[in-house]
Amino acid sequence: MKPSEQIRKLAAEHGITADREFIDDWADKVSELSGDTGEPSDEIEQLLINLRRAEKIDPAFSRQLFHLYMTTEKHPGIQ
């Protein structure tokens, strides 16, 4: 199972959506104003953020899923 599928499955099991909160938009704006040229979280990243925020997964597992998602799906080849 791909990391994105695992994240979607976990989110569905816990009733978690990819809806953004005010703090997410605020953090993006702060990053933008500080000169960060990064991109906002995609749907999968937001699901992972919301799973952590709801304390449905622990920080270590969240980091593991994020790393797997980033290196195998979003930016393959980056370790």
Image (spheres, helix red, strand yellow):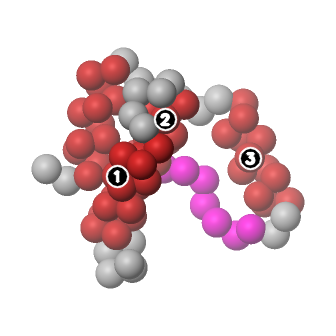
Residue under pointer 3: 27
* Label number found at residue 65: 1
Residue 24 disc label: none
Q: Is the magenta stretch mostly helix, strand or loop?
A: loop
Residue beneath disc 2: 52
Q: Which residue is drawn at 67% across and 39% down?
A: 24
Left or right of 17 on screen, residue 37: right
Magenta residues (range): 36-42
Residue at 29%, 37% in the rendered image: 8
Q: What residue type is labelled 3?
A: Ala
Along the viewing direction, whichever of 68 and 26 lies nearer the viewer: 68
CB contact under 8 Å: marks 3 and 1: no
Q: Residue 30: x, y in percent?
A: 82, 52
| Amino acid carrying mark 2 in the image | Arg
Can the viewer see residue 18 in this picture?
no
Q: Which of 18/61 is in front? A: 61
